[in-house]
Amino acid sequence: MTVPYLMEDQREASRLVDKVDPDAWVHTYLGPVLPNDPGVRVLDVGAGPGHIAAAVLRARQTAQVVAFDGNPGRLAAGGPDGAGLLRRSGDARALPFDDGSFDVVYSRLMLQYVAERDVAVAEIARVTRPGGTVVLFDLDGQLIWHDPLGPEMRTLLDRVTAALGAAGFDPHTGRRLYGLARRAGLTDLDVRVDPYHLIAGRIDPVQRAQWELKLDIARPLISRALGSPEAGNEAVTAFMAYLDSEETLTYSVAFTVTGRRV
């Protein structure tokens, strides 16, 4: 059994790759904690096609990196195993690794989709060696922070986020990372908050294409939440029109919590 993923779709691997500069992300969020020691062991939990894991290997060429994801097809989309990079699939709530197997374990944008977040973070801590580092990165406010927001759009977003919540998604996962890390027994916690989505006025073409694809992948769930495919299509159209307006602002933030396993 694996963690259900709301964005399960053949297009999801390429969407994940297109929305981030993996080398820049590794430099900013992992660079300060990645040891330079030869053979350092690194695990990416919720790796998608392994694009971030591949960037870790570029940053630390003697590392041993494992990209772990719940969907073997999505992992395979990133290419075969290679020197220093292995791909493994399974359940993030029961990682198939021995205690203390890795020097650094990180999870990027996975926990928001996992209902049993405490279990997943406890597993991340378990497979980190004593003295090793855990990095948790996730969003807060995705889909729900907008201004101005009229009653019709507010009602629409409330219904969609309620359906997402019933399926295990939490739009406020970012703020929960600190508590999750504490309950997993991690110490020396450091918390960082950065802007993530920031759309002031009309959305630019690149971001618009990313949001269109994201909403198209989520369209079946939106349709079920609203009662019909027609209602789902109308909701997607209305939200894209909102993003196209010069009068609106949409934003979210990313929390990063870094801790040490005792």
Image (spheres, helix red, strand yellow):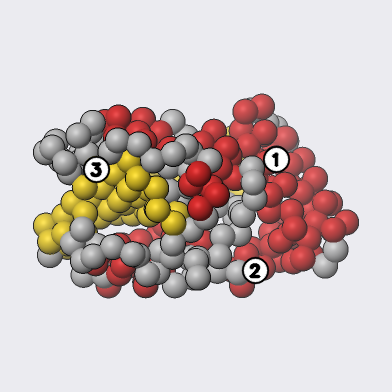
Residue contact between numbered discs 1 and 3, judged by CB atoms under 8 Å = no
Q: Earlier in the sequence, mark 1 or mark 2?
A: 2
- Residue 153: x %, y % from top left: 74, 55
Q: Is residue 203 above or below residue 259?
A: above
Disc 2 crowd, CA 10 A, few/some/many (<14, 14-19, 20+): some
Closer to the camera, 197 or 167?
167
Which residue is identified by label 1? Answer: 212
Q: Is residue 9 visible?
A: yes
The picture quadrant where one finds residue 101 is bottom left
Q: Amino acid at mark 1?
A: Glu
The one of 242 and 179 positioned closer to us in this rendering: 179
In this picture, residue 59 sits left or right of residue 148: left
Which badge, 2 or 3, comes first in the chain's sequence?
3
Q: Is residue 39 left or right of residue 54?
A: left
Q: Are marks 1 and 2 in contact (CB under 8 Å)?
A: no
* Residue 170 to residue 197: above or below: below
Q: Which residue is mark 2?
A: 162
At 23% from the left and 31% from the top, the residue drawn is: 61
- Is label 2 in a helix, a strand or a loop? helix
Of helix, strand and loop, which one carries label 3?
strand
Per the model, the C-alpha gap separating discs 1 and 3 is 36 Å
Give the number of the mark in front: 1 or 3.
3
- Mark 1 surroundings within 10 Å by alpha-carbon count, few (fewer than 14), some (14 through 19), many (20 or more): some
Q: Which residue has dot 3 on it?
A: 64
Residue 172 seen in render:
no
The kind of residue tagged 2 is Ala
Q: Nearer the viewer, residue 196 or 124?
A: 124
